[in-house]
Amino acid sequence: MQARQEAPASAEAPERPESEAESVRTRVLRFLRGVGGLAFSLAVTLLGLLVVTFLIGRVVPVDPVLSIIGDRAPASTYDRVYRELGLDRPMVEQFWIYLKKVLSGDFGESFLTKRPILDDLRRVFPATFELATLGLILGVAIGAPMGVAAAAWKGSWVDQIIRVLCLVGYSAPIFWLGLMGLLIFYANLGWVSGPGRIGIAHEFSFQPRTGILLLDSALQGRWDVFRNVFSHIILPACILGYFSMAYICRMTRSFMLHELSQEYVTAARVKGISETRIIWRHALRNAAVPMITVVGLSYINLLEGSVLTETIFAWPGLGQYLTNSLQNADMNAVLGSTLVIGVVFVLINLVSDLLYRLLDPRVRRGS
Amino acid sequence: MLHSGKRGKAWIAAAALAAFAWSASPSALLAATPPDTLVAAWSIDDVLTLDPGEVFEFTSSEIIGNTYETLIGYELDDVSKIFGRAAESWTVSGDGKTFTFKMREDRVFASGNPMTAEDAVYSLVRAVKLDKSPAFIIGQLGFNAENVEAKIRQTGDYTFEFETDKPYAPTLVLYCLTATVAAVVDKKLVEEHAADGDYGYGWLKTNYAGSGPFSIREWRPNEAIILERNPHYAGAAPAMARAIYRHIPEPAAQRLLLEAGDVDIARNLGPEEMAALASNPDIRMQEGVKGTVYYLGLNQKNPNLAKPEVRQALKHLVDYSAIADTIMKGRARVHQAFLPDGFLGALDETPFALDVEKAKALLAEAGLPEGFTVTMDTRNTNDVTSMATAIQQTFALGGVKLEIIPGDGGQTLTKYRARTHDIYIGQWGADYQDPHTNADTFARNADNSDGAAAKPLAWRNAWDIPEMTAQTDAAMLESDAARRAEMYLSLQREHQQVSPFVIMFQQIETAATRANVHGFVIGPSFNDNSIAGVTKD
């Protein structure tokens, strides 16, 4: 991401525009070039993803026909389905047919769910999005301050405790953490609800619109549903958040230590500025810039769907959908999910880039 | 390096406390399931369709069994007692080829449309013409897309004829009509949604057009299947207004939900969860013997496995009772013949037990006194992997070095069907309640060539058996039940000794229910599992 930040800077570096008109023209051109570049990189990224995923799908030693018709059907049925899937054509042709359909907005149908891929994705992605976003918010809200504290009191007991907490977050298998979380907070203490997204009592009285249940229930003023949904999502979000927290905390600590050893910090101290001000106003402001990348990557990780967390918490999200599709060679579903992840990846990178410009005057000035 | 300041640390401590208190704040929202709703935790990711003409998986079979009616049914505790369900009665012509069915006149679909012979004929014709996975159950009786409309014909409002190509054993024909593929669909409703002559398949695969005790309200893949009481059901109305099958893939999570009372039934508990729940007074265990057998298939393309003495030796190198008792723990029992208990002609003799000396002698006879090395394709589920490991240990006692090749279901099955395995550890569930269903696959191989159209288990293990195939075909046509049972018994005795199948166990399905839930039935086949009679205290 750093490298990409530099690229436009060197490309744009030319002399300053002389007149106002020229300046406007240059800006428009630059904007258009930016949009064009973005569209191009998006197209290349997605095409590359499709090609690779398609090839992987074809070399996986699983017969998709068997996933559809099972083990018992006679040869005639097998042959018919084989032809229906287009498997009798050359691979290049298969890919070309698929690509043409995708370009016309037809992602095909999943043979596991018997529904259009877009419908499936509209159902599973909001579930993952909601969980990942809450997980990330928790991860950042807790991880970043903890990282700052660990750096500020480097070597003290605060740092040690945080180190251990992060180590557990890093190394404990998420599967185990999830089950332990359920056992303690759901089964023993009864503080949260069990696996699933919403309680049965609310299942039939509530019509979600976006599929992001917290948002839907809040928009409809159904606070009873909101509470119920929150009690379902908070534990898996904490488990996912714990994992991101550990990563974000460690990275924040190391970025902060780097900043605190800079000369400007020494200068500030000499001037008698309070430690709190130095940490929060000066060092953190600078450490926040590389943190954008870390947070962005964490978010992408979470949005790909965590199949283990989703399995334990019976969360009907993208991770489970993609894994199940892969295991059954349901390639339309795999390709569709991959595209979604690709788009999310590009979008988050784009947002990171914009945030860089906002926070880092050097990048802003350079472009 | 920094002046830490006590104030800062106090802030941290306060923040930690606040975070803890905050995480504890969502109040307990746990509630028992509603009294008129049955909630089951089950791994339902095998559901691929809701069309009875296509359904062939465990979960969806159970859903169809509870939401549609087949023409014929059988008593669950004695499957030899066949009765009419949507059909009231039937007669068989003198040549044994034409069955005339009379339908019950009181059947009404959930849509409100009355059920007539037109619906029954349409459903059977539709199944054959759609040609989905289970279509062969009807098709094997001599029907194909070209002739089915002429051979299955309506003769009156409530009567129709069903003409087979050969005089099959009448019970075979009737048992085929107990399968979900022969469920009666609402022709009027389905045809309203038909497009391009697809017999409404595009619609019915995610919708419902039946007449069973429940109707299907919604199927959300990998999330839930929701059933509702069918107000038009002709039989006794279910006590439950609603039944929800929730997709809970993780057995440990199923256990926690059951203990907390958030579900009424847990369907996929493993031995650990079962053991943990055994002492809980709020939970009851239930079990039922299923028509599924676990077996090893020995590929006859492997020169070592092709030797009769080696096949015998391997049958003596499995510790059947130890696996049943310690690994399967009540979820399987030792069974060594291809027909499961409960079937006509089932053989309950178990001539094989772990006998290392005998196995070594047999291997020496085969010219392999030092044993040999062989691979086994193993599906990476807990049960199968544990069984495979146990078998690996006992094989080693006889000098047979077994290498386990793990893979997911799709991979191992693809390899098995390509006949490129050495040994395959698998399970086989009966498709319908007639003995021919398993004889057809374990003891019949009409064409052993690589390009054969049919790929029964005998073919997959490259076992060329023209004589046994003829015997199986003869048993299929025997109309005298007692004589037919005798034929299957002798077929199995021979099969047990010479076949390349180490048949080991018969599956027992278990379920744990809350103590206040009564009337859940585990039948011999998945579409017999019934929730229609469930009540709650």
Image (cartoon, coloured by chain):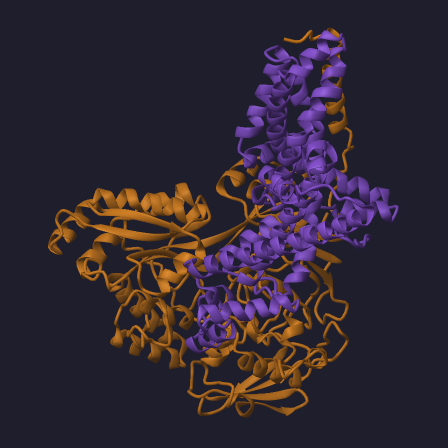
Chain colours: A purple, B orange
Between residue B295 and residue A237, name the one nearer to us. A237
Could one spot residue A170 in this view of the protein?
yes
Between residue B325 and residue A334, name the one nearer to us. A334
- In this image, A328 relative to B506: left or right? right
Residue at position x 64%, y 65% from top?
Answer: A115
Count the marks. 0
Q: Image height check: is B492 above or below B380?
A: below
Q: Image height check: is B89 above or below B514?
A: below
Q: Position of residue B349 (x, y in %)?
A: 32, 58
Residue that protrudes farthest toward the front in the picture: A18
The part of the image, by quadrant, that contains residue A120 is bottom right
Q: Position of residue A221 (x, y in %)?
A: 88, 46
Q: Position of residue B513 (x, y in %)?
A: 62, 46
Quadrant housing the N terminus of chain A: top right
Between residue A228 and residue A109, name the one nearer to us. A109
Q: Image height check: is B319 above or below A329?
A: above
Quadrant housing the C terminus of chain A: top right
- In this image, A164 relative to A265: left or right? left
Residue at position x 61%, y 51% from top?
Answer: A341
- In this image, B490 relative to A158: left or right? left
Residue at position x 73%, y 16% from top?
Answer: A278
Q: Position of residue A344 (x, y in %)?
A: 65, 49
